[in-house]
């Protein structure tokens, strides 16, 4: 009988509980035991590991739709790679992870994380030498290369669209523009997808240069005197400081355009998991469990052209834009961004959405 572990790392998003539920059910149907590790690497570096055995009754199917993680993702005070580096305890931390995994006697570990977690797993693969490591991609940023979908992204887009749908009603009532700032870090996919879905008049993303004066003129020439300007949190404006939405709001106000900045913030990580994300979770979990059964290791699951497959972490790392991690010295992460030939950019342009200086 195989013993597998599962943990959620990094930021939370909707869909994590769907993955956990389907791992437990899938493992149970194969006659395997599943152990959930609490608080990610913080729970794993304890001796013994802070873990609980999971059964089909642990997370009922009706609760698998809920956002957040049944296993938790830790808090600012937990021990993880970032805090271990800051405290000068990274060698001890890595040693404890290996000892803890050995103590659990696991045959495999399913790590649900983002590009930072996957980059760390790839760079520190010796920690997982004696077991099968399979990673499942989750992130509302959708900044992981080599997969057409990440768990949590579709729900985040839907939550953002619902927010903007309501904001549009008050925008119309007051002849007002709302500058809505999205999450996404340096990747603008969340802003782009939600912006097209809601019919924004402008979408500003980090990947595409824009001119603040051109943006203002575009809004002045709009057929309506209200609407949405979608702004990704990763943009910068030369000569301006502050939050991106505030910077653009000030420029609009200076031009006499009635507007407000709006910040949906953490609702983008919340909301009942959409059907699309639940299906993605089911596909990726089935693929992950098959990989464990086949003895694969150091791989991630990926949806490509509708088919779910495993991709070596080495390929994931090499395929992205590798750049230094701002929080962990000596670590580089592999990142994905909006590609210049993304069809959605052409769709946005055809909708007369201002998206900057497209080539």
Image: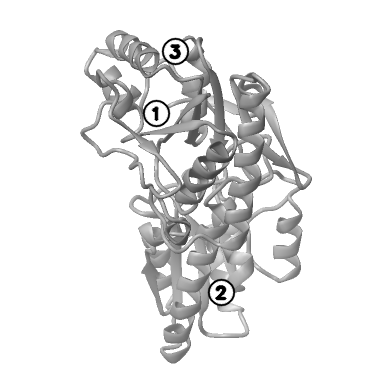
The residues tagged by marks 2 and 3 sit, at their Cα atoms, a distance apart of: 53 Å
User: What mark, if any, has residue 219 been given in the picture?
Assistant: 2
Above/below status of 310 relative to 190: above
**Is residue 48 among the parts visible in the rendering?**
yes
Disc with the residue nearer the chain's start (1 vs 3): 3
Q: Is residue 142 left or right of residue 175?
A: right
Do the residues bearing badges 1 and 3 touch, measured as CB atoms within 8 Å? no
The residue at 55%/48% (across/down) is 151
At numbered mark 3, what does the secondary structure look like: helix, strand or loop?
helix
Above/below status of 191 relative to 20: below
In the image, 6 versus 351, the foreground residue is: 6
**Is residue 236 among the parts visible in the rendering?**
no
List x then y, in percent, for residue 152.
52, 51
The residue at 70%/52% (across/down) is 358
Q: Name the residue furthest bottom.
A: 173
List x then y, in percent, for residue 335.
57, 33
The residue at 24%/13% (across/down) is 88
The residue at 57%/71% (across/down) is 217
Residue depth check, mark 1 versus mark 3: number of the one nearer the observer: 3
Do the residues bearing badges 2 and 3 touch, measured as CB atoms within 8 Å? no
Disc with the residue nearer the chain's start (2 vs 3): 3
Disc with the residue nearer the chain's start (2 vs 1): 2
Q: Name the residue furthest right.
A: 305
Residue that label 1 marks: 326
User: What mark, if any, has residue 127 been given in the picture?
Assistant: 3
Q: Is residue 352 left or right of residue 188?
A: right
In the image, 184 versus 149, the foreground residue is: 149
In the image, 202 versus 139, the foreground residue is: 139
List x then y, in percent, for residue 276.
62, 58
At numbered mark 1, what does the secondary structure look like: helix, strand or loop?
loop
The residues tagged by marks 2 and 1 sit, at their Cα atoms, a distance apart of: 35 Å
């Amino acid at each position: 009988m195989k013993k597998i572990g599962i943990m959620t790392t990094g930021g939370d998003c909707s869909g994590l509980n769907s993955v956990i539920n389907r791992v437990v059910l899938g493992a149970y149907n194969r006659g395997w035991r599943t152990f959930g590790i609490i608080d990610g690497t913080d729970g794993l570096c304890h001796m013994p590991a802070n873990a609980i055995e999971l059964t089909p009754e642990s997370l009922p199917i009706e609760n698998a739709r809920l956002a957040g993680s049944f296993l938790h993702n830790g808090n600012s005070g937990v021990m993880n790679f970032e805090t271990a580096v800051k405290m000068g305890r990274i060698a001890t931390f890595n040693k404890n992870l290996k000892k803890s995994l050995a103590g659990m006697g696991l045959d495999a570990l399913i790590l649900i994380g983002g590009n930072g977690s996957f980059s760390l797993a790839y760079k520190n693969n010796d920690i997982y030498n004696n077991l099968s490591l399979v990673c499942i991609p989750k992130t509302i940023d959708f900044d992981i290369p080599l997969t057409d979908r990440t768990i949590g992204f579709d729900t985040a887009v839907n939550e953002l669209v619902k927010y903007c749908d309501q904001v549009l009603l008050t925008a119309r009532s007051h002849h007002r523009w709302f500058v809505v700032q999205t999450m996404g870090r340096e990747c603008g996919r969340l802003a782009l997808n939600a912006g097209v879905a809601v019919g924004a008049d402008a979408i500003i993303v980090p990947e595409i240069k824009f001119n603040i004066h051109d943006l203002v003129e575009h809004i002045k020439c709009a057929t309506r005197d209200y609407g949405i300007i979608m702004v990704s949190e990763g943009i910068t404006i030369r000569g301006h400081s502050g939050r991106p939405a505030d910077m653009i709001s000030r420029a609009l106000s200076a031009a006499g355009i009635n507007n407000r900045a709006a910040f949906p913030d953490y609702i983008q990580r919340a909301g009942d998991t959409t059907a699309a994300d639940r299906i993605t979770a089911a596909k990726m979990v089935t693929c992950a469990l098959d990989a464990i059964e086949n003895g694969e290791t150091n791989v991630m699951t990926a949806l490509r052209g509708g088919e779910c497959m495993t991709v070596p972490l080495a390929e994931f790392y090499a395929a992205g834009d590798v750049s230094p991690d701002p929080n962990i010295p000596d670590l580089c992460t592999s990142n994905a961004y909006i590609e210049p030939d993304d069809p959605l950019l052409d769709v946005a342009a055809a909708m007369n959405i201002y998206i900057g200086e497209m080539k």
